[in-house]
Image (spheres, rainbow, N blue to C red):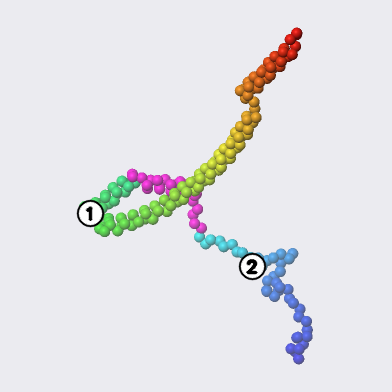
Amino acid sequence: MAVDRQLREPRIREPRERREGRPRESGGQRTPERDDRRRGRLDQPQRRRPRMTLPNPDSEAFGRLSERIARFLGTGRFLVWMTVLILLWVVWNIAAPASWRFDEYPFIFLTLVLSLQASYAAPLILLAQNRQDDRDKVNMEQDRARADRTVADTEYLTREVASLRQGLGEVATRDFLRSELQVLLKELDNRSAAAVDEDPAA
């Protein structure tokens, strides 16, 4: 009977804040707990903050430095200095007294130094090559634009020269005027001779 009474009686829904045990603020404002719950919704993208921020050096300055190092690594002076250093290293660790030697044969420390140098030199050279490729790409685009402008100017000049030729073709030349004047003079002479023949008394 008690169960039937509970089913028949209408349920009065409690406010959401009271059901969840959160106090409701005055003015209908959201509580910080509600804002936190709203941020954790699955239908909204979340911004993940990086746990560890890496140093962000100036890319332009670092690129210039890498180009200088890459240029130096590709010179004969670097090869000479590197060869002299390795020879001094080997000779010192072979001929020096045992207490003064810091890298015994098979020169593991020298191998480590050379490997470290190669591991840094390769990315620096690649970075310098990437910057050079970017510059070459910009230069190629500028050359292409300049070539397009040159072609457009050449076509314009060609059309202008063709129109000038057509205009000059319609202009009377000096030889043409001389020949026309000579024909007119001959016609005048013939007419005057014919007039004298017809009127001998005059």
Residue, disc 2: 43
Measure the alpha-carbon separation of dots 2 and 1.
70 Å
| Location of mark 1 (residue) | 94
Whether residue 72 is in magenta: the answer is: yes
Placement of 88 over or under 25, stated as above or below: above
Q: Is residue 20 above or below residue 129?
A: below
The chief SS type of the magenta part is helix
Within the magenta stretch, is there residue 66? yes
Label 2 amino acid?
Asp
The magenta region covers 53-77
Q: Quadrant of residue 152?
A: top right
Closest to the observer: 18 or 112? 112
Q: Residue visible at 61% across and 23% down?
A: 175
Q: Is residue 143 left or right of residue 184?
A: left
| Residue farthest top in this picture | 201
Q: Is residue 84 left or right of residue 128?
A: left
Quadrant holding the C terminus: top right
Q: Amino acid at mark 1?
A: Ile
